Image: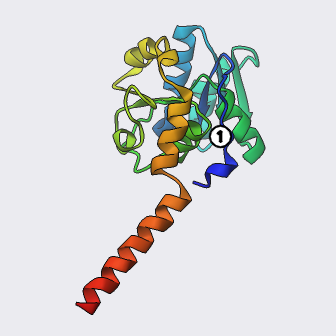
Amino acid sequence: IDIAQFDFQPEPDDYLLFFGRIHHDKGAREALEIARACNKRLILAGIIQDRAYYDQYVAPHIDNDKVIYAGSVGPVERNRLLGKACALLHPIQFDEPFGLSVIESMACGTPVIAFDRGSMPELIEDGKSGFLVNNVEEAIITVTRIKEIDRATCRFYVERHFTVERMINEYIQVYEMILQDRLL
């Protein structure tokens, strides 16, 4: 990512964030369960990809107090929501190949609580930039531990591993290796 597009926020507000498509695969229903069990406010942001899922599992809980649906948000609101959340909930129901919102969240200093599936172990340093959990029950317990995560560590982790600059430098290294091999 272009890290300059994400402001580091050292002090969060007291809400959890779900940031992604409203669809079974992304776990909006599970995020609602986690927030409700922790008695935390939940903000959901993202497009409604599955209207029937939204109508059945999400809409009945929206009260604009404890559960807020912000819809699809642009870069400024994305930056604010990600940066001020105490944690991003990412209870995915599939083996996600990446997870851009996970990286964007940590770039703002916000730790992530994610189901340990797909690429999540490659993106989250368990216990340092967030927590990897196996189910809703573990996520609920982990919300109480979120203050153990240093928000500056989350930002630094992204700076070290997921910036455009790093990608460019590694591409250059690969190109130089290819050229070197051709010269030999």
Residue at the image position 41 percent from the left and 42 percent from the top: 123
Residue at the image position 59 percent from the left and 26 percent from the top: 56
From this view, report whether residue 112 is shown above or below residue 101: above
Is 47 placed left or right of 91 in the picture?
A: right
Residue 157 in view: yes
Q: Nearer the viewer, residue 59 or 111?
A: 111
Q: Quadrant of the C terminus?
A: bottom left
Is 178 placed left or right of 20 in the picture?
A: left
Give the x, y percent position of residue 79: 70, 40
Q: Nearer the viewer, residue 96 or 85?
A: 85
Is 45 placed left or right of 94 in the picture?
A: right
Give the x, y percent position of residue 16: 60, 22
Tell me which colouring the rendered structure shows. Answer: rainbow
Residue at the image position 66 percent from the left and 16 percent from the top: 14
Q: Nearer the viewer, residue 57 or 123?
A: 123
Residue at the image position 38 percent from the left and 35 percent from the top: 125
Q: Which residue is mark 1?
A: 46
Q: Secondary structure at mark 1?
A: loop
Give the x, y percent position of residue 44: 65, 30
Q: What is the crowding at mark 1: few (fewer than 14 residues within 10 Å), some, or many (at least 20)?
A: some
Q: Residue placed farthest to the bottom in the image?
A: 183
Quarter holding residue 92? top left
Amino acid bearing label 1: Gly
Residue 102 in view: no
